[in-house]
Amino acid sequence: MSLELLKQRIRTEGRVYPGNILKVDSFLNHQIDPVAVREISDALAGLFAADGVSKVLTVEASGIVLACGVAERLGVKALFAKKADHGNVAAGRYTAPVRSYTTGQSYTISVSAEYLTARDRVLIIDDFLAMGEAARGLLSLAEQAGAAVAGLGFAIEKGFQPGGAQLRAQGYRVESLAIVEQMREDGSILFRS
Amino acid sequence: MSLELLKQRIRTEGRVYPGNILKVDSFLNHQIDPVAVREISDALAGLFAADGVSKVLTVEASGIVLACGVAERLGVKALFAKKADHGNVAAGRYTAPVRSYTTGQSYTISVSAEYLTARDRVLIIDDFLAMGEAARGLLSLAEQAGAAVAGLGFAIEKGFQPGGAQLRAQGYRVESLAIVEQMREDGSILFRS
């Protein structure tokens, strides 16, 4: 799937919900099209192929297939942070709070200190970048582990929300395959060129 | 990864926790080894290659990468049921209650009626089969949709727990790549031959 085809699928299959929520449940967030996953993963992996990535980090659930695909292509392992209610995290784990823009709820993400270490150079992968809350949580986990961060890669960025701009202003390399510039109430979706 | 290698990895990397809990966090349940995922997926897909599967059904989170891998190999799409607190499910979805043996907690799984229909012939894929609670929830979703069930495939079955025997007694085809017969407190793991 070329980038143009990804944008076309977002345009035709993406659904816009109140509150600037965009879902691509037909191929990524609920139903999963392995062909799309493969193409998105390959494109993201290609962008970071020369960056010495030792581990791909994501958070459950939708990001896992992309992280696994990117990790396969880069020849490394993936690690997905688990979501838990606050206070329900075992010892030996790094934790970070995340507030979901979509649901309005807060939760804790965590990874085992065993699988994320100061020897790692991490690539953070997720399906969506919007407010950047999950990304900041994952960056916090990497920082707690003393891991370096090669960058962050997303299938879809909502460019009219501040997450991407903030992360780039902090100096992180952020790559998004499709950046949505505007979503209209009639369901039409405009991309940044 | 041959079946022998899968068993060897479970034996060396699997960890036994109180309450007959087995975790393979080093390659499947937290950290993900894409090579292992590929081999497990290919093996499961091979077992159901001639069964006319139109959709692979699983539940978040650990099962998703295997379901996606199996779906890719079978040339179909995967669908992952989402977990929600009870009562927090949108309209147009099939729902089923699941009680987690590992955590002791109950939750609701659901899929959109749009992506699971009476035209589907479903293969249920998950990482673990133990008490069979998640599998029964997924079977309930398939039944509500009027979908046929080609069978169920698992990476690891805990053969000393009743899920597999019950599902087979109900007439379902259940395929597990590695069946754990006994887990001892010293961490040793015995497989059914």
Image (cartoon, coloured by chain):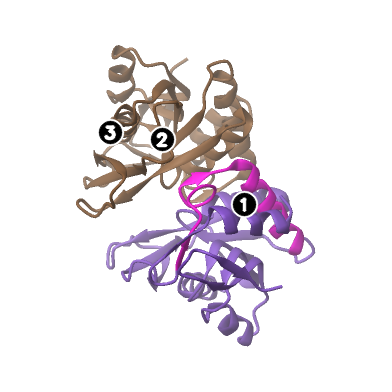
Chain colours: A purple, B brown
In the rendered structure, which amino acid carries the disc numbered 3? Glu
Image: B71 above or below A142: above
Where disc 1 sits, the SS reads strand
Residue that badge 3 annotates: B133
Query: Going by the image, does B85 lie left or right of B146?
Result: left
Image: A104 above or below A82: below
Q: Report the disc number at residue B116.
A: 2
Where disc 3 sits, the SS reads helix
Image: A43 above or below B47: below
Distance of mark 1 from mark 2, alpha carbons?
Answer: 32 Å
- The residue closer to the viewer here, B146 or A86, is B146
Say yes or no: labels 1 and 2 on the same chain.
Answer: no
| Residue B153 picture location, percent across and down | 46, 26
Residue that badge 1 annotates: A77
Q: Report the disc number at residue B124.
A: none
Mark count: 3
Tell me the quarter of the picture where residue B167 sits.
Answer: top left
Residue B13 in view = yes
Quadrant location of the N terminus of chain B in the rendered image: top right
Q: Which of the marked residues, 3 or 2, is nearer the chain's N terminus?
A: 2
What chain letter is assigned to the residue under label 3?
Answer: B
Nearest-to-viewer mark from 3 and 1: 3
| The magenta segment | A21-47
Distance of mark 3 from mark 1, alpha carbons?
Answer: 29 Å
Residue A119 in view = no
Where disc 2 sits, the SS reads loop
Image: B123 above or below A110: above
| Residue B28 picture location, percent across and down | 51, 43
**Is residue A33 magenta-colored?**
yes
